[in-house]
Image (cartoon, helix red, strand yellow):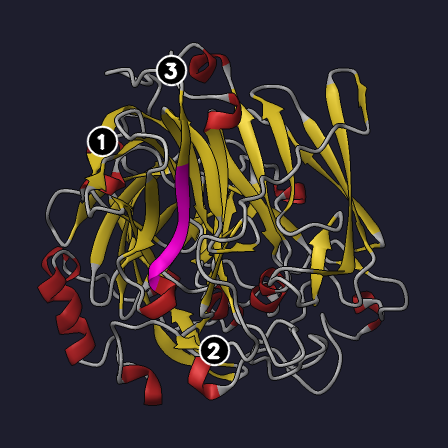
Amino acid sequence: MAERHTAHGGTALPRRRVLGIGGALGLIATGGLALGGGMAHHPARTGGELRTAVPVPEPYTVPLPVPPVLAPAGTHDGVDRYEITQRRVTAEILPGVRTELWTYNGTFPGPIIESRRGRPATVVHRNELPVPTVVHLHGGRTPAASDGYPTDLVLPAGWPDPAAGHGHHGGDAPKMHDERAVTSRLTRTYTFPMDQRAALLWYHDHRVDFTAPAIWRGLAGLHIVRDDVEDALDLPRGPRELPLMITDRAFAEDGSLAYPALDPNLRDRPGVRAPFLTGVLGDVILVNGTPWPVHETDAARHRLRLLNASNARHYELEAVTDDGRRLDLVQIGADQGLLAAPVTHTSLPIAPAERYDVIIDFAALPPGSRVRLRNRLGTGRTREVMAFRIARAARDNSRIPAALADDLPTWGRAEASAVRDFAFRAGRTPHGRGWVIGDRAFDPSRTDVRTRLGAVEVWRLVADVHHPIHLHLVGFRVLSRGGRPPLPHDAGLKDTISLRPGESAEIITRFDGYRGRYLFHCHNAEHEDMGMMANLEII
């Protein structure tokens, strides 16, 4: 019989109350997931939208850029070394408008790192920004010392040393002391063994209390892992494999990125203004840092490596021709790599931090055709994402195999040594109103979950509003939603699951890889900054 736990040591919820949308809504009604103040009024819309104050281009007029692939700075004993400098730049995101960005190596998104499974890599980050930073490789099977724990800061020149009693930031905000934090000055070397399946990962800032505005300012990039299993498949490749980072932003009158931070300098006081406590949404959709771009290409299959790197915006993507016909989106991969077999969608929901690997086939379209990638959850200009313009006929030797991968884990409920319950909801934090897991806001000095290396566990999750839940280190399988089978887009091995308002889900995972302190949290970046993280200790 599996041992049963609840988040933070609370009373175990009966199974029938956790499973099922009705059970989740019952928790809300009885106060277990009561929303605070203004958060209760629009549970289906998780976020407040900023309005851009400068002219924006017409959709599908700016070419799609592809981020550059970063070359190793050197190789020693089979380990590739990369070097990245975090610095401020001024760039033209909107045509004719200059915008200051915080970047990895001067570009937004940052450069792509490509790795081989089993070939280790080190990345040396140098912080030339005015505030501390932390780098997390999202989806990486990474030793705890390099996972990017939020208090393991890389301090810029002149920043007070937290060990001297200054806390993790200055000013009068509550200090979050962490005796286990490992800080460095100016640089830090992150080590990634790359002992994992081929997949699309991404790296981003993870500084405690200030992750959301740092990502908003540009600190995000892609990391692609490849392996022999994937290489043996005749999937689209080269220019027909497109990494696509989708984000939303808003721009102020001076062209700067608008963001409702309580402290615009991101030094002292974390958080956002009250209308944006549920999340910050922009009204300009960017793909690879470009507003509503267009990509001119061949009439052939293309592989789209999709990442939602938005702070809070959810998308439901569809591919539509100008005459109104929807093209299939054939999913071949999830957050943690290839599926066992393809899954065909006519539209695909994607929450913050989720990744989908899909094939789209333009072969039947004549030159001159246009296909728009649209957002069914958007309104006005946020309904548009990007477009493909078919320029020419072309040969296509790619195919979509009926079987993709045979190495997916087959964990079963009978193997689980623990079943844990977690409620993600609005609540009180040391900074005031915010977001909690169970009834507790994040505290680095507290261990919320302790488990053994190699343990298999079932986690049962329930949400009040939209919460994309992310586990560090491990991938998981979705067992159920609302007491029913998983949805089609839940296929494969994931590290982020999107919970809708009032929804519950069960996931199963094995905590293998490495011992140490890790996190699980909501990847609505504003929720994360306002307390919705917890500690996972693997012993």
Closest to the observer, 84 or 135: 84
| Disc assigned to residue 396 | 3
Displayed quadrant of residue 490: top left
Whichever of labels 2 and 1 marks the residue nearer the N terminus, that label is 2
Give the magenta part as a residue range.
Answer: 383-389
Structural distance between the alpha carbons of marks 3 and 2: 43 Å
Q: Amino acid at mark 1?
A: Val
* Label drawn at residue 343: 1
In whole angstroms, how far apart are the C-alphas of marks 2 and 1?
35 Å
In the figure, 490 relative to 5: above or below? above
Question: Which amino acid is tagged 3?
Answer: Asp
Residue 384 on the magenta span: yes
At 38% from the left and 15% from the top, the residue drawn is: 396
Q: Which residue is mark 2?
A: 50
Q: Is residue 99 left or right of residue 57?
A: right
* Viewer-side label of 3, 2: 3
Task: Please state which of the two labelled residues, at mark 2 or mark 1, is closer to the viewer.
Answer: 2
> What secondary structure is found at the residue carrying circle 3?
loop
